[in-house]
Image (cartoon, helix red, strand yellow):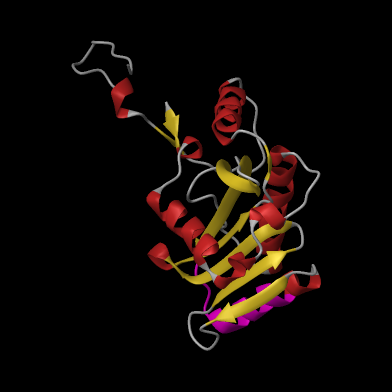
Amino acid sequence: METTRFRQSSKQLAAIAVLIATGLTSVSCAKEETEMTPREGRDQMVEFVKTTTVQTHMNGWWPRNGAAVAGECGLGNGEEGASYNFDLAAPKGSDHVAMARLVADYWESLGMTVRIVNPSKNPVVFAEGGPVLRAMFDTFGPDDLYLIGAVAPCAPGDAVALNEEDEAERKSGKILPGDEGVVPREDPRDRPAFPGEATSAP
């Protein structure tokens, strides 16, 4: 059984690419000093995203692109580290401008540096600092959805090993931060080729 929490969709990668490609990347992972481990950064980042959704007073937020996933990042001097990313989505509201301002004000209250792109129509809020490395609130997300996502600070660690360990913990029944609401999807390789015939993924 394969679930969305074990893989990033192309749209999640696109959302993360937007975070990385914006002008807010003037502060790189290498310049973000943190004593947290990657998983401590994940936990704080997931809580940040969830708390932000609470500020919107909207229901229906869910991990459309799966659970928090670790990716590679640079610590400087050629050293690689790991950083988790995560996002939640919800059906769009009616006043995008007011919602963007609400989220921006909340992030500013956390000491984050915030800017709003296209503020008068379908705004996108970008922020950096505070409890995360970068964050984004998109009022013009795919499939008529709002999207709130964030990237945790870079910390020493191996992203591949972290994801493998996370998957092993999930298979043992443990629910990790960001797993809540992830929708399981059946792996078609697990389906019998013919009625009564058992198959297994290679």
Q: In the rendered structure, does residue 111 fall within the stretch colored magenta?
A: no
The stretch drawn in magenta includes residue 104: yes
Residue beneath the point at 71% across and 67% down: 55
Q: Nearer the viewer, residue 37 or 201?
A: 37
Q: Main secondary structure of the magenta part?
A: helix
Query: Of all residues shown, which one is farthest toward the bottom?
Result: 120
Q: Quarter holding the N terminus?
A: top left
Residue 9 at what x, y percent from top left?
41, 47
Position of 121 with respect to 186 (left or right) is right
Between residue 50 and residue 27, name the one nearer to us: 27
Relative to 183, residue 58 above or below: below
Given the current orientation, which residue lies at the most extreme front position? 77
Look at the picture and state if 127 lies above or below 184.
below
- Residue 182 is left or right of residue 108, and the answer is left
Can I make out residue 84 in this image? Answer: no
Q: Start and end of the magenta stretch?
A: 91-105
**Residue 139 appearing in the image:** yes
Q: Position of residue 63 (x, y in %)?
A: 54, 49
